[in-house]
Image (spheres, rainbow, N blue to C red):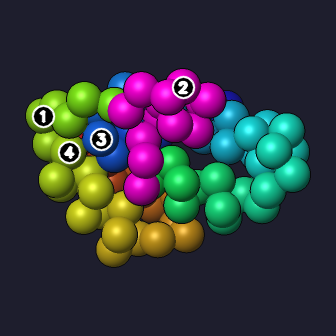
Amino acid sequence: MTMDIPCTICGEPFDMDELHFIAEETNSTHDQVREKFYRDGCNIVMGSATRCTPSGNSLARSALADILGADIDGYAAMTEDFDL
């Protein structure tokens, strides 16, 4: 079972397994891709030049990502628990 994580900026669900695939495709580490996802949102990670549009609880999602850092499972669970 895969878990979705919301984009820190727009809140769109993103399959966390995609971060592994993107890391392989871009010859990056999973941590580098996760940090970029947290910082720049799903559009940047997916290769689009367009930035995400902040929506809803973007400040709460971003703060939670900063607090939890590499604990992506914790980020996924907490954003689900709090419906962020």
Q: CA distance from mark 2 to mark 1?
A: 22 Å
- Residue at screen point 25% across, 29% down: 53
Q: Which residue is mark 3?
A: 9
- Residue at screen point 14% across, 42% down: 57
Q: CA distance from mark 1 to mark 3?
A: 9 Å
- Residue at screen point 50% across, 28% down: 49
Q: Which residue is mark 1?
A: 56
Label 3–label 4 contact, CB within 8 A: yes
Report the amino acid beneath label 1.
Gly
Q: Secondary structure at mark 1?
A: loop
Q: Secondary structure at mark 2?
A: loop
Neighbours of disc 3 within 10 Å: few (<14), some (14-19), many (20+): many
Report the amino acid beneath label 3.
Ile
- Within the magenta stretch, is there residue 50? yes
Quarter-wise, where is residue 24 in the image? top right
Find residue 48 and name its label. 2
Q: Position of residue 72 (x, y in %)?
A: 53, 58
Range drawn in magenta: 39-51
Neighbours of disc 4 within 10 Å: few (<14), some (14-19), many (20+): some
User: Is 22 drawn above or below residue 75 in the view shown?
Assistant: above
Label 1–label 4 contact, CB within 8 A: yes
Q: Is residue 32 left or right of residue 41?
A: right
